[in-house]
Amino acid sequence: MTFLKSIAPYAHWGLRLSLAATFIVHGLMKFPPDGFAEFTGLPIIVGWLVALGEVGAGAALIGGAILSRDVLTRVGGLIVIIIMIGAISLVHIEKGFNVLNGGYEFQLLMLVTGLYFLTKGNDV
């Protein structure tokens, strides 16, 4: 138990970096967002907001920890939540829960992780 308690203050890095990397990579893959917007049937402005939001959320989650800025971590978490609500409701909900069928289980995991960072900030 002593070992686990000693690494507990650093456990957030696994969640933080995996969520941030996923958002940054997926956001960068959407540039230019014309194709993404067309594929999803969303207006181009929404495509831009999603692409920029994903990259921004990832950067905020990392920057919040490195710069010790609680507000950056919380804003990153909020952006994750907003984007995941959109992804679940507009794309994945009709396919059910199972990710193998295109369902929302992965997006739900990211949404809840975003909620964790929104509520906890850097007090993790």
Image (cartoon, rainbow, N blue to C red):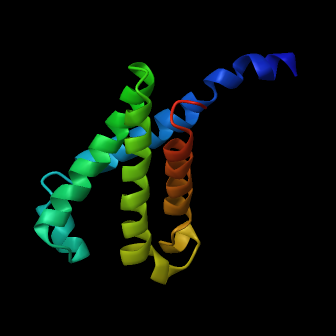
Q: Which of the image's four quarters has the N terminus?
A: top right
Q: Residue at x 44, y 31 (%)?
A: 70
Please tell me whether residue 76 is drawn above or below residue 81 in the rendered image: above
| Residue 53 in view of the camera | yes
Residue 46 appears left or right of 120: left
Q: In terms of image quadrants, where is residue 86? A: bottom left
Residue 28 coordinates in the image, percent (x, y): 24, 45
Looking at the picture, tell me which residue is in the foreground, 62 or 97.
Answer: 62
Q: In terms of image quadrants, where is residue 41? A: bottom left
Residue 34 appears left or right of 76: left
Q: Residue at x 12, y 64 (%)?
A: 45
Number of marks present in the image shown: 0
Please tell me whether residue 79 is drawn above or below residue 89 in the rendered image: above
Q: Which of the image's four quarters has the C terminus?
A: top right
Residue 75 appears left or right of 111: left
Residue 67 coordinates in the image, percent (x, y): 38, 20
Residue 102 coordinates in the image, percent (x, y): 47, 72
Looking at the picture, tell me which residue is in the foreground, 68 or 42.
Answer: 68
Q: Residue at x 54, y 69 (%)?
A: 100
Instruction: List the single residue furthest toward the bottom.
Output: 94
Residue 52 coordinates in the image, percent (x, y): 22, 49
Please tell me whether residue 74 is drawn above or below residue 40 in the rendered image: above
Q: Residue at x 51, y 72 (%)?
A: 103
| Residue 29 in view of the camera | no
Looking at the picture, tell me which residue is in the foreground, 64 or 42.
Answer: 64
